[in-house]
Amino acid sequence: MTGPDHADIVAACTALRFVRVALAARRESTTAFDKALESFNTATTAAIGSPESPAREDGWVTTAEAAERLHCSERWARDLAPRIGGRKVGGRWLIPKASLPEQETVT
């Protein structure tokens, strides 16, 4: 049995944010929940890096990086993302490095 992967951590963080919003909507105190959520975020960041931004070595880039490689706007990279194998994580598009041209080196 293996531990949770990055996608599992992102899903857990999304679920916890939803619970926080639901508590606030019911006008319940979120102080204790916020402290617990902060501890959870600290623990997961220490274990796997920030759940909001996957590690660079996993083969994914942001739309800003993709736009730079494609020589286009970030908006166009976002529109292109689902067509070139991108996935949405935490409300942001990530694009596989393999679907982009190699980054040019300036000499």
Image: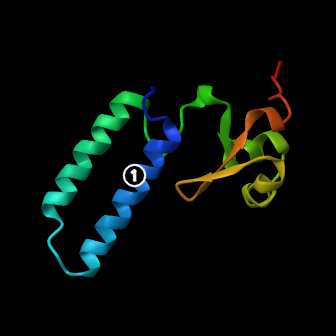
- Residue at 73% over, 48% down: 86
Q: Position of residue 42 (x, y in %)?
A: 28, 38
Q: Quadrant of residue 9?
A: top left
For residue 92, what is the image quadrant? bottom right
Q: Position of residue 46 (x, y in %)?
A: 34, 30
As drawn, the residue found furthest toward the top would be 107
The residue drawn where x is 83% and y is 28% is: 102
Name the quadrant containing residue 100: top right
Quadrant of the frame with the N terminus: top left
Residue furthest to the bottom in view is 26
Q: How many dots with numbers?
A: 1
Residue at 80% of width from left, 39% of height from top?
Answer: 69
92 relative position to 79: left or right: left
Q: Could you tell me if residue 53 is visible in this image? A: no
> Does residue 62 appear to the left or right of 106 in the view shown?
left
User: Does residue 100 appear to the left or right of 92 in the view shown?
Assistant: right
Is residue 69 in view from this perspective?
yes
Q: Is residue 18 above or below residue 55?
A: below
Give the position of the C terminus as an image quadrant.
top right
Q: Residues within 10 Å of mark 1 (few under 14, many from 20)?
A: some
Q: List the residue tagged with mark 1.
A: 13
Q: What percent of the width, then of the height, locates residue 43?
A: 29, 35
Q: Secondary structure at mark 1?
A: helix
- Way the structure is coloured: rainbow
Q: Position of residue 63 (x, y in %)?
A: 69, 49
Amino acid type at mark 1: Cys
Residue, x 43% and y 39% (percent of image)?
50
